[in-house]
Image: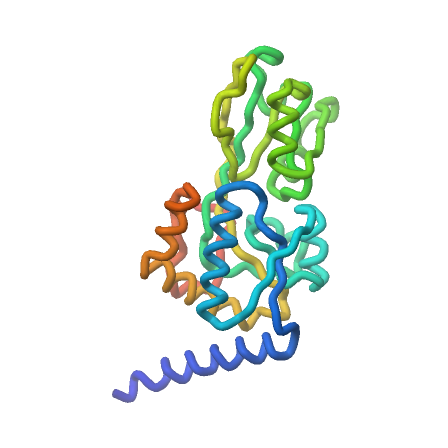
Amino acid sequence: MNSRWPRLGFIICLFLAASAALASSEQKLIFRSALDTPAAQYSQALLSEAYKAMGIPVEFITVPLGRSLIESNRGNLSGELARVLEATQSYPNLRAVPYVLFDTDVNLYVNQTKCAGCSFSTVNSVVYIRGAVILENMLQALPSDIKLIQAADTAAARQLYEQQKVDAALFVAYSLPEQPQGFDSMMQTLKTVPDYHMLHKRYQPLLQALAKTLFKLEADGTAARLRQQFGVASPKHQLQSHLSQPVAEFH
């Protein structure tokens, strides 16, 4: 009987700390709206459900992908919708919620008509989405003579590739829905890492309460329903619900 009181007290304290963190700052949390990819749209839908269950109002606004990290790190945005953990290395004011939203596949598409047999390090040109941290870090390792072309979003990158204006396209958490017309295309998954929701450090007291809510949505089938709706696969590995620290990669 008495063993229940420490756990109950912990839950009450967690709730009060989360409420205090929200009350002492904005009344509403503000995030960048989802990109035009299934994984991002799924994340926005799931997080909307989680914050609603917690009684916390949220708003999603249009912000360039690269700019949102800067504004989130400054605290002008409440955090990031979904990012890989390595983003916190360059933006140290962000804290990851210990719940895997989805697995991020980094997919390379190469035009085999223009660049037959080319690999990631031997293509002449590659388009990628500006602000995608995982892509930008990978591209730094490429030879300096490879032409790197930035696109504002997935649709713009796809258009450049399908119009054969570049040899290759690098996408994160996105796959072309069909084979491009007019040329042979080869896809290779270069890397897979987990994505997490992130909050500015002033909302740190919310992290565990939000993770607990997300695990509840996992348990009651809400997450599975939304994954089916948006066509997003379950993460290959999910954290244990008692863990307080996210991990960058699963081995």
Extreme residue toward the bottom, this view: 2
Q: Position of residue 144 (x, y in %)?
A: 74, 26
Q: Position of residue 164 (x, y in %)?
A: 64, 18
Q: Is residue 170 left or right of residue 192?
A: right
Q: Quadrant of residue 114?
A: top right
The quadrant holding residue 119 is top right
Residue at image coords 55%, 73%: 205
Structure colour scheme: rainbow
Q: Residue at x 63, y 66 (%)?
A: 201
Q: Tell me the quarter of the picture where residue 155 sits.
A: top right
Q: Is residue 177 left or right of residue 167?
A: left
Question: Height in image: 63 above or below 12?
Answer: above
Is residue 92 left or right of 2 when viewed as pictured? right
**Image quadrant occupied by the N terminus:** bottom left
Provide residue 86's location: percent of width, then percent of height. Answer: 59, 49
Query: Which quarter of the figure is the C terminus placed in?
Result: top left
Look at the picture and state if 129 lies above or below 242: above
The total of numbered circles placed on residues is: 0
Looking at the image, residue 164 lies above or below residue 65: above
Q: Which residue is pictured at 64% across the width and 52% down the height? A: 89
In this view, the residue farthest toward the left is: 1
Q: Is residue 14 above or below residue 153?
A: below
Q: Is residue 125 visible?
A: yes
**Residue 45 pos. (x, y %):** 48, 54
Question: Does residue 90 show up?
Answer: no
